[in-house]
Amino acid sequence: MKSEHEDIGGNTRFTFSQRKENALPIAYVLLTHGAKPKGGIAGHPAAKQQLENLQFAAVKAGKPDALFWQYDHSRKFQCLNDLPKLKRSLEIAKEHGSHVLIDDFRRLVAHCENNRGPHLFFELREYQGHLMELRTGKD
């Protein structure tokens, strides 16, 4: 099964292969304010710090072009299904032995509606080992 991912400019630039050793990490950005992007998110105010953090980590690792960028735009959400690109990215990462990188897990909890943060983290446990936080370096 092949799945395409978009870069931050909105252009398709990579297709995951069936071979796990070719799977690259997916950098995930959560946009919780501002207008819904019509293309890329490079200039989006909600993405700025997240993009800088994720790109810095890639440069520090010596692989500045080794990330694929995905994002969801959602002001409020209750479950993983409300963040379809995160969910699909996690499914692909799990299938291909890769990771989804997020700069800070607290972004997910801070915007969960109706105190649903614990429920969301319960859902994310299915992808343990495939979702990494840059802030702590932990899964």
Image (tube, helix red, strand yellow):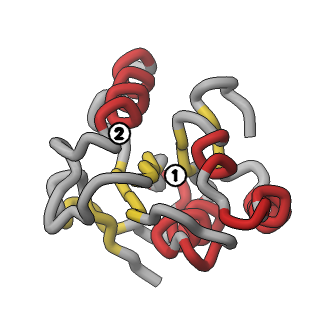
- What residue is at 29 percent from the left and 34 percent from the top? 48
Residue 27 seen anywhere in this rendered image of the structure: yes
Image spot of residue 38 (x, y percent): 15, 68
Question: Mark 1: which amino acid?
Answer: Glu
- What residue is at 74 percent from the left and 40 percent from the top? 139
Which disc, if any, is residue 31?
Answer: none
Q: Is residue 53 above or below residue 99?
A: above
23 or 131, nearer to the observer: 131
Q: CA distance from mark 1 to mark 2?
A: 13 Å
Residue of label 2 = 66
Q: Which of labels 1 and 2 is toward the front?
A: 2
In the image, taking residue 139 as reference, residue 15 lies left or right, namely left
Which disc, if any, is residue 21?
Answer: 1
Q: Residue furthest top?
A: 60
Q: Is residue 45 above or below residue 11?
A: above
78 or 63, nearer to the observer: 78
Image spot of residue 113 (x, y percent): 67, 65
